[in-house]
Amino acid sequence: MGCLIFERKLLAFKYEQVKASIDSSEFMHKHDSAMNLSALIEARKREESLKMAIGINEACIASLEKALHEMRTECAETKVSAESKVSEAHQLIDEAQKKSTEAEAKLRAAESFQAEACGYYSVADRKLRDVEAREDELRRQIKSFKSEYVFKYFFGEYRALLYTRNAKDEEHGALCDEKTNLKLMEATLTIREEALSKRESELNKKEQELLDLQVKLASRESDETQKVKAVQEAELGARKTNFEAELQIQLKLVENEIEMKRWAWELKEVDLTQREEKLQEREHELEILSRTLGEKEKDLVDMSSALKEKDQSLRASEKELELNKVLLQKDKEEINKTKLDVQMSLVSLENNLRQFDNAKERHEALKSETNDLSVLEVKLKEEIDVVRSQKLEIVAEADKLEAEKAKFEAQWELLDEKKEELRKEAEYIAEEKKAVSAFIKKERDKLRQEKENMRDQYKRDLESLTCEREEFMNKMAHEHDDWFGKMQQERANFLRDVEMQNRNMNILIDKRREEIESYLKEREKSFEEEKNNQLEYINALKEKVAKEYKQVSFEMRRLEVERPEISSDCEQRNK
């Protein structure tokens, strides 16, 4: 009985030891499952943080696409504004050409008035010929008077005729002097008329040359504007196509990058699911191992193998973290590349703006040349007007000479019996002279008034054109400054946003890296502590098992020693 009681106690002790080992193994299993749950939660947190990083990258890509779209719209708006301004410049050129045609029409009207004045001059010349014919008639009358004088001389009227002859000779001498003076004045007038005709022909040549030059300049300006417009349209089309091609390439690259990242994240998700499945399988295996734990040596072997697997999983997680770091560095480099591409596109836009400003300056130079030619044309027209005024003065002097001739004829005809007729003719000539002078004065006043009106109209048109040009240039400069300032502001905002995003990304990456490093350090530290604790526990268990084994062996030896005594006691009792 004592042996059975002892064996029962021994079995109860062994049962308690086995129960304690099972409890410890269950505790270790719970601890491992808690660690696995914490690792799974941490993996989910990492997945959420990576999803947030993907969202930030997608937001950056969307902001870049929005900025590119805004740049395209601004380029289209600048193109439309440039075309409208070119059309306005063409309208201004057309208005200037219309005004020049109106001035030419007025110049033709003035030439027609000049032709009418020439007609009046021819009428005055014809009247001068009539006066010369009358002078010839007077000479014939003088000859007849001389014949009468001879006749009267033979009839005894010598003294009276001599007296009248002397008077007539004196009058004839005075008339001859006046006639010579008139001829000299007529010669000077003809010389001045020839000089005026030469100068007028020269002015007409200059005017024709000016018109040819104006036509050439207009054709050249139109050709230059067409060329500039064609070049600008070609450049804008090429820039538009290049920009659209670059945008398409960049969009494709971004889409490919997004697709690659999505595939990478899907692969990572698959990897995480596989790891979760592995963890579940591992939990199942641990359950199986906990159920199949029978002996302490197997338990110790399983625990050491579990520790080794944990070490391998930690190493695998460290490798995955390093791969994530490499991927984040690659993403950062790709963001920097996109930033450089955006800066290059901004530089190309600034170069295109400079080319547009150069074309505008060439157009302004052509406008200044046209203004200079218009000033020369005005000066030539003024010289033509001066020559015409001189010609009118010569006509007036010719009229004065005609009046003096008429006076001479009146004085000459006082000597003969046709005094009254000559006086009537002189009055008629004086009336015609007054009418002609009044008409010439009227036409001269009309021409002067039209000239002043044309000059005032030209001044008003020139002032309006200068005002419009100044307003147009100020408007262009203001729009250019506003547009350039807006571009600079948007560029600065865009660069600031990109820098802020990069800074935030770097801060997030650094923070995440620090968190991961601290977490890994803590995990490593806890793992080392747990490993040391497990090793100490295993060593303690080994020592305990060794002690128990020694005690059991000692008890077995003692039982073997006491067994013959007990058997002898039993035999004695049976006896």
Image (cartoon, rainbow, N blue to C red):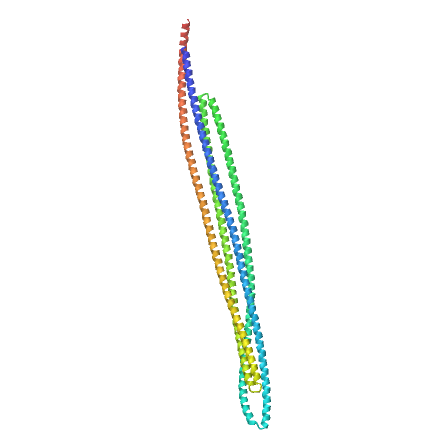
- Going 48% across and 29% down the picture, which residue do you hit? 279
Q: Position of residue 227 (x, y in %)?
A: 55, 57
93 or 326, which is in the foreground? 93
- Residue 344 image offset from top left, x and y in percent: 49, 49
From where the camera sits, is residue 382 visible? Answer: no
In the image, residue 144 sits, relative to residue 439, either above or below, namely below
Q: Residue at x 49, y 26 (%)?
A: 284
**On the rendered image, what quadrant is the C terminus found in?**
top left
Q: Determine whether, in the image, residue 498 is placed left or right of residue 191.
A: left
Residue 197 rendering spot, x and y as whole percentages? 56, 74
Q: Quadrant of the N terminus?
A: top left
Where residue 316 sits in the image (x, y, percent)? Answer: 47, 33
Report the front residue among 446 and 246.
446
- Asked whether the viewer can see residue 393, the reply is yes
* Total numbered badges shown on the rendered structure: 0
Where is residue 512, by image quadrant?
top left
Residue 179 vs 374, above or below: the answer is: below
Residue closest to the eye, 558 or 250: 250
Q: Residue at x 40, y 22 (%)?
A: 543
Q: Is residue 311 above or below residue 469?
A: above
Q: Using the image as rendered, state which of residue 119 and residue 225 is in the foreground.
A: 119
Q: Quadrant of residue 41?
A: top left
